[in-house]
C-alpha cells in the first residue's frame, strides 16, 4: 500500500536491502537479547537446555533450602528466595509460545550474522547465504534474488562498497516460524571516488526453512538523508497467545483470510479515506516506512502523517503467507496513488509490503507498512 513516499533507494542496484540496521530488546521485558554465534544457525539446544535446566531446578533447590535446618537457616532461606525471584523474572518466559523468546533471539542473531558477513565478505556472498531460494527483492520490480544474480558476473572487488546494518526491532510468530526485522543501515563507498555515504532503514521478512535455519523471504527498505542517531536497544512486539494450535490451522485457508483482510482494508480506504480506513485496520504500534522520511511509529504518528494526505489509492496483492500459528502474516503487491480530483492524476506507483498480526479478538491488523515507489515515468512526447 502506498500512503505516501518518495524516490526508490539508489542502492537497490547494488543490493536488495538497504544497509545499516542495528539492535533491539524484547518489548515485554526490554531485554537486550544475545545468543552465542555457535548456537545461531543450529536449533537452540545449548541455550534452550541451559534455560530449561534452571527453570526446572531452581524451584527444587529453593525447596531444599527452605527446609534446611540450621542456625543460619533463615539467612539461607531469604538469600535463596531473593535469587529465585531475580532469575525467574529475568529468564525468558517459556509460556509465551512454543519456542518463546528463543526463536526471537536466534532470529536477531541470524540478522546480525547476516550483517557481519556483508561487511567481512561482501554483499553478494552475504545475500546468497542468508536468502531463501525464493527470497524476493525489489529492483525496482519484485524478483527472486538468487535467480536475478545467478548469471551476473561477480564483482572484481567484493568490498568496493560496504553495506552494514543492525536490527533495532524484531518480532516472531507464536509458532516461531515467521518473523520480521528492521533497523538502520549505512552504505559506504570504498572506491577511490569515495561517494557520500547513504543511509536508511531495511525491512526483512524471515521464514524458518526445513533445516530450521532462518532465511530472508522478502527484503525492502527506505532511504534517509541522515544517519540513525537513536537508541540501539533491541525492541520486540509482544506475542498474543491464541487458543488455536498448529494442528488445526489450514494454511491455505489462512492465506485466503489474509487476502480478504487486504481487500477489506482497500475497501475501507476507498470509502472512508486513507486516514480512517488505515487506522481502523492497523495496530496501535503500527509502523509506516516511506522514502526520504524517518520511520513513522505508532497510531498517533500515523494519524498525523496520513491526515495530510488528500489522495486516492488502489493496490493489488501479489502474495500472502501466514505463520503455522496463524497469528502473523505478510503480503506484498503493487499500488497506485492518484489525486483526489476529477482528473485523478497519477502521483505515484510502486510496490508495497505489509505485515499483519492478529489481535486478541482474532482480527487481522497491520503492524508494518512499507512502500517502494517506482522512478517517475518520463513524460510522453508528441510525434
Image (cartoon, grey):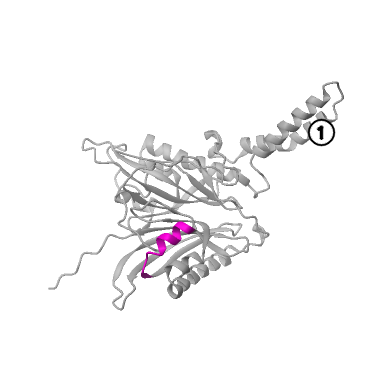
Q: Quadrant of the N terminus?
A: bottom left
- Residue 211 in percent (x, y) is at 55, 46
Camera-side residue: 72 or 202? 72
In the picture shown, does residue 84 fall above or below 228? above
Please tell me whether mark 1 sits on a helix, a strand or a loop.
helix
- 140 left or right, relative to 98: left
Residue 359 in sight from this viewpoint: yes
Which residue bears the numbered disc 1?
A: 63
- Residue 309 in percent (x, y) is at 37, 66
- 6 left or right, relative to 193: right
- Residue 133 in percent (x, y) is at 45, 51
Callout 1: 10 Å neighbours few (<14), some, many (20+)? some
- 69 left or right, relative to 258: right
- Residue 324 in percent (x, y) is at 59, 57
In the picture shown, does residue 59 fall above or below 383? above
In the picture shown, does residue 264 fall above or below 37? below
Residue 150 in sight from this viewpoint: no
- Farthest residue in the top direction? 71
Which corner quadrant of the image does residue 114 belong to? top left
Residue sitting at x 47%, y 68%: 276
- Farthest residue in the left direction? 383
Q: From which residue to which does the magenta span run?
A: 300-312
The total of numbered circles placed on residues is 1
- Farthest residue in the right direction? 69
Residue sitting at x 42%, y 43%: 21
Q: Quadrant of the C terminus?
A: bottom left
Question: Does the magenta run of residues contain 366?
Answer: no
Camera-side residue: 225 or 64? 225
Amino acid at each position: 500500500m502506498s500512503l505516501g513516499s518518495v524516490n526508490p533507494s539508489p542502492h537497490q542496484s547494488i543490493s536488495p536491502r538497504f544497509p545499516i540496521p542495528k539492535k533491539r530488546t524484547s518489548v515485554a521485558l526490554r531485554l537486550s537479547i544475545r545468543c552465542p554465534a555457535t548456537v545461531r544457525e543450529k536449533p537452540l539446544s545449548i541455550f534452550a537446555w541451559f534455560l530449561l535446566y534452571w527453570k526446572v531446578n531452581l524451584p527444587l533447590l529453593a525447596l531444599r533450602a527452605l527446609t534446611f535446618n540450621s542456625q543460619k537457616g533463615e539467612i539461607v532461606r531469604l538469600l535463596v528466595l531473593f535469587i529465585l525471584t531475580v532469575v525467574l523474572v529475568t529468564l525468558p518466559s517459556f509460556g509465551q509460545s512454543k519456542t518463546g523468546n528463543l526463536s526471537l533471539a536466534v532470529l536477531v542473531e541470524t540478522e546480525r550474522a547476516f550483517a557481519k558477513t556483508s561487511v567481512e565478505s561482501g554483499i553478494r556472498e552475504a545475500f546468497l547465504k542468508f536468502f531463501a531460494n525464493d527470497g524476493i527483492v525489489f529492483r525496482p520490480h519484485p524478483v527472486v534474488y538468487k535467480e536475478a544474480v545467478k548469471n551476473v558476473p561477480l564483482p572484481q572487488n567484493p568490498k568496493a562498497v560496504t553495506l552494514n546494518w543492525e536490527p533495532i526491532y524484531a518480532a516472531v510468530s507464536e509458532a516461531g516460524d515467521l518473523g520480521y526485522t528492521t533497523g538502520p543501515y549505512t552504505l559506504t563507498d570504498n572506491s577511490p571516488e569515495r561517494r557520500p555515504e547513504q543511509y536508511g532503514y531495511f525491512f526483512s521478512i524471515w521464514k524458518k526453512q526445513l533445516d530450521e535455519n532462518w532465511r530472508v523471504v522478502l527484503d525492502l527498505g527506505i532511504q534517509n538523508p541522515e544517519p540513525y542517531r537513536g537508541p540501539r536497544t533491541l525492541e520486540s512486539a509482544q506475542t498474543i497467545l491464541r487458543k488455536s494450535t498448529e494442528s488445526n490451522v489450514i494454511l491455505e485457508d489462512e492465506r485466503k483470510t489474509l487476502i480478504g483482510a487486504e481487500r477489506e482494508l482497500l475497501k475501507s480506504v476507498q470509502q472512508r479515506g486513507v486516514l480512517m480506513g488505515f487506522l481502523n485496520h492497523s495496530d496501535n504500534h503500527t509502523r509506516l516506512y516511506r522514502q526520504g522520511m524517518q520511520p513513522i511509529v505508532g497510531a498517533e504518528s500515523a494519524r498525523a502523517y496520513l491526515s495530510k494526505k488528500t489522495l486516492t489509492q488502489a493496490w493489488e496483492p501479489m502474495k500472502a503467507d501466514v505463520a503455522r500459528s496463524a497469528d502473523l502474516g505478510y503480503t506484498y503487491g503493487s499500488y497506485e496513488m492518484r489525486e483526489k480530483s476529477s482528473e485523478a492524476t497519477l502521483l505515484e506507483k510502486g510496490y508495497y509490503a505489509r505485515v499483519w498480526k492478529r489481535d486478541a479478538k482474532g482480527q487481522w491488523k497491520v503492524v508494518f507498512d512499507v512502500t517502494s515507489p517506482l522512478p517517475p515515468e518520463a513524460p510522453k512526447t508528441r510525434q
